Image: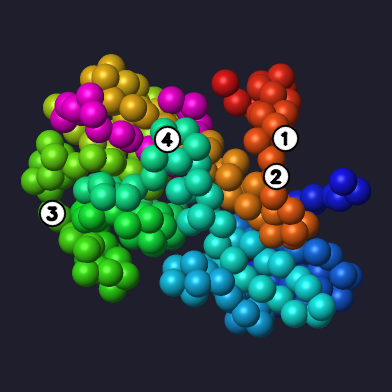
């Protein structure tokens, strides 16, 4: 397709001009990343239910002079999980580590996908409490040991372990059960310390690349009004492998 995708570094003071500038130029849409996923919302006309529920936008689609805000981090996360591990979160008891922006998007998507229960553990307990507003299934816990043995799915959204193989958001003493699944949204390193531990214990583990990949697929589909077919997905994966971007 005759498209280009470019990156721009924008100062906060220029965010409004950049937004309306892109609109005036007639671009199909754009992604918004940290730290503007919330700030950008004041310029957008209409929101998807995910963007509204999470109060953050990572994808803007422009059509007929109107702007639409989406959150494909949330939809992409579940799609990636389903693609890579054959099921999403339906019926699962989940432990979510962290309570920042990424945690909110993932909490929303796990709840939307009908998880049974969502325990949230965060270093700063009070910050996690705001996630309770999402749904009565959310429960904030003060110690992971309270639930670690019986959760089905563990999702790390903290930055602990990023660029550092010596750190993990869970104590070394914690063992995974072989039927548990772990998703760490970090992808640098490709396998985090937490993932290596889960794998050594026989549990399924997934890094953050599928989320990154599928949020991009979903954005591209929105902008172009298409569905990217499995054969094309495999082709893209092949190219990324060839370039050494994924393993
Ligand atoms: P993001 O938008 O990527 O989620 P964020 O909003 O800065 O980023 O959130 C980072 C998360 O990692 C938070 O849950 C943070 O915990 P706090 O709320 O207590 O700050 C967590 N985090 C970062 N560094 C951490 C550390 N050294 N130990 C434990 N948790 C940490």
Residue on which disc 3 sits: 142
Residue on which disc 1 sits: 232
Disc nearer the start of the sequence (4/3): 4
Q: CA distance from mark 3 to mark 2?
A: 42 Å
Q: CA distance from mark 1 to mark 4?
A: 19 Å
Q: Is residue 68 above or below residue 143?
A: below
Q: CA distance from mark 4 to mark 2?
A: 19 Å
Q: Please identify the dominant SS of the magenta region.
A: loop
Residue on which disc 2 sits: 228
Disc nearer the start of the sequence (3/2): 3
Residue at 59% across, 61% down = 58
Q: Position of residue 93 (x, y in %)?
A: 22, 48
Disc nearer the start of the sequence (1/4): 4
Contact flag, marks 1 and 4 (Cβ < 8 Å): no
Are there few (<14), some (14-19), or many (20+) residues within 10 Å of tag 3? few
Q: Nearer the viewer, residue 233 or 30?
A: 233
Is the CB of the residue bearing disc 3 within 8 angstroms of ligand 1? no
């Amino acid at each position: 397709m005759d498209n280009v995708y470019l990156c721009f570094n924008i100062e906060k003071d220029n965010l409004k001009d950049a937004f309306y500038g892109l609109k005036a130029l007639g671009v199909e849409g754009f992604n918004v990343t940290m730290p503007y996923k919330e700030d950008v919302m004041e310029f957008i006309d209409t929101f998807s239910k995910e963007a509204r529920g999470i109060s953050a936008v990572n994808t803007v689609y422009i059509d007929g002079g109107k702007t639409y805000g989406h959150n494909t981090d949330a939809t992409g996360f579940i799609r990636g999980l389903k693609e890579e591990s054959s099921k999403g979160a339906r019926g699962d008891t989940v432990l979510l580590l962290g309570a920042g922006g990424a945690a909110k998007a993932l909490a929303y998507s796990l709840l939307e996908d009908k998880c049974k229960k969502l325990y949230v553990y965060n270093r700063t307990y009070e910050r996690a409490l705001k996630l309770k507003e999402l749904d009565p299934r959310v429960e904030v816990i003060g110690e992971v040991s309270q639930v670690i043995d019986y959760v089905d799915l563990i999702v790390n959204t903290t930055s602990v372990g990023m660029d550092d193989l010596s750190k993990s958001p869970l104590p070394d003493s914690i063992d995974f059960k072989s039927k548990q699944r772990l998703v760490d949204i970090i992808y640098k390193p490709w396998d985090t310390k937490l993932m290596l531990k889960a794998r050594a214990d026989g549990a399924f583990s997934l890094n953050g690349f599928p989320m990154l990949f599928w949020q991009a697929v979903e954005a591209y589909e929105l902008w172009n009004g298409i569905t990217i077919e499995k054969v094309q997905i495999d082709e893209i994966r092949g190219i990324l492998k060839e370039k050494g971007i994924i393993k």
